[in-house]
Amino acid sequence: KWEACLKVIKDNISIQAFKTWFSPITPIKLEDSVLTIQVPSHFFYEWLEEHYISLLKKVIKKELGQNGRLEYSIIMEKNQTNSTPYTVKLPASNKSSLHNSPVTMPLHASEKQIKNPFIIPGLKKVNVDSNLNPSYSFENFVEGDCNRLARSAGYAVAKKPGGTAFNPLLIYGGVGLGKTHLAHSIGIGIKNQFPNKTVLYVSSEKFAHQFIDAIKNQTTNDFIHFYQMMDVLIIDDVQFFSGKEKTQDVFFHIFNHLHQNGKQIILTSDKAPVEMQGMEQRLLSRFKWGLSADLQAPDLETRIAILENKMYGNGIDLPREVVEYLAYSINTNIREMEGALTSLLAQASLNKKAITLDLAKQMIDKFVKNTAREVSIEYIQKVVCDYFDLPIELLKSKTRKREVVQARQIAMFFSKKMTKSSLANIGAHCGGKDHATVLHACRTVNNLSETDKQFKSYLDDLEKKLSIQ
Ligand code: ADP
Ligand code: MG
């Protein structure tokens, strides 16, 4: 059974993550739909719980049925001669039971068969689970030149939600640079100072799913009301709304209501408002009412400070040279840098070895190679445009010039093949096309590559260029 679970898990996470966190697990027994797995350390257990709980729950349900449960057995770390494992039970419900508040937003209202998930009758003030992650606090957010403006704007908003010129506050920047962390910090700051304010953090994806469910269940009014009751609304990764007109519509109404009533809105995005394609103009213009602050890639000192902060928080100590090597080798994405640090620790705890510079080098070099291979849509567009000697703006535009159309189709084809982006998202990047157009493009390219040798050789060339990156 565990084998079957592993297969599903493997398809859902990166190879690196799979190797680090799932290969070392040993299944021990299966009894009455309770599967016990052995993990190498408590650290491992916590990491799994924190990062893979929903995936684990899904596969366990799938493989063991509705009553399926997972138990961990942890190998004693301190006392290695005594290898009696101790067991931690994983309740069928997840860790959100930590936040013990009366109402949580069900992701799939229909699944829980709640007709009116958004409204609590008889209550003026809603009591919601804010969904804030306490470890993403301002205290844990290291300041540097790269984030100073965004951080201090966030800080000001946390002190005076709705009472600054920064409404909405839009934090934007590349992947893994701290947008989500900072957004949580603001929410946490507000909750600390104004415990009675209703603060809600929600990802754009969840917001959009809830909206779809509300349409299905005919509870869109409740959905809107629920969101209009917030004092502070934090929506993460709004670029996800690109190309989703209805979702943008409903968000527009909620936005206006909150803004008119002096409620604070905090948004994050991986792009600046001017670069957000597939987003309605009226929304974009509202995003500009407040402040847009960007997060840049951190410089070396800040990267070292972030690593030290993280180690300190976890009671870990590493040689200075290892920390510096790590900070030097991974210089764009903080999440990846932290990922490398954790795999390093996992490896060390697994092999019971101290982390020397040599060990760190071996590990990190592998890690960097592995992650560098993920290409982005933008990168694909750039490579395709260079190849056909076209300006990238044309590819992103709506023009129907023959040579542009073909290059655009090829870019869509590789984006579908090599990234995890949705068809809608790919379309939004390529001149605001819809998902059907993208699908059509992929088919066209496929067909052509089968019939046209010249075309096929272009494709092969491009594929090579894209995979060396
Ligand atoms: P994004 O949302 O921009 O993709 P995240 O907020 O998820 O990025 O950040 C990725 C990781 O990097 C998180 O673990 C976060 O805690 C950490 N991080 C980012 N910026 C900082 C910072 N300035 N100080 C400390 N940790 C940071
Ligand atoms: Mg994020």
Image: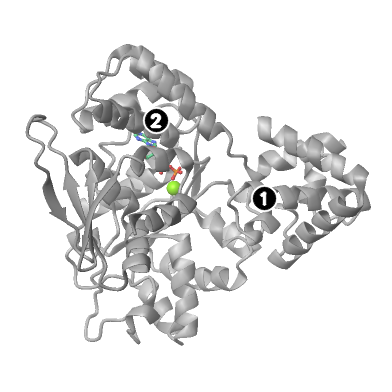
Residue 3: quarter of image? bottom left
If the image is split into quadrants, where does the N terminus sit? bottom left
> In the rendered view, would you say 338 is above or below 414?
above
Residue type at mark 1: give it: Lys
Image coordinates of residue 56 in percent, x first then y, are 33, 57
In the foreground, 29 or 315:
29
Ligand 1 under 8 Å from disc 1 Cβ: no
Q: Are marks 1 and 2 in contact (CB under 8 Å)?
A: no
Q: Which mark is residue 340?
A: 2
Does residue 371 appear left or right of residue 122 in this picture?
right
Alpha-carbon neighbours of circle 2 within 10 Å: few (<14), some, or many (≥20)? many
Identify the residue shown where x is 30% and y is 53%: 187
Residue 319: quarter of image? top left
Which residue has dot 1 on it? Answer: 417
Identify the residue shown where x is 36% and y is 65%: 63
Identify the residue shown where x is 70% and y is 41%: 380
Residue type at mark 2: give it: Ala
> In the rendered view, would you say 445 is above or below 220?
above
- Mark 2: which secondary structure? helix
In the foreground, 322 or 217:
322
Q: Closer to the camera: disc 1 or disc 2?
A: 1
Who comes first in sequence, dot 1 or dot 2? 2
In the foreground, 284 or 81:
81
- Mark 1: which secondary structure? helix
Alpha-carbon neighbours of circle 1 within 10 Å: few (<14), some, or many (≥20)? few
Image coordinates of residue 361 in percent, x first then y, are 42, 17
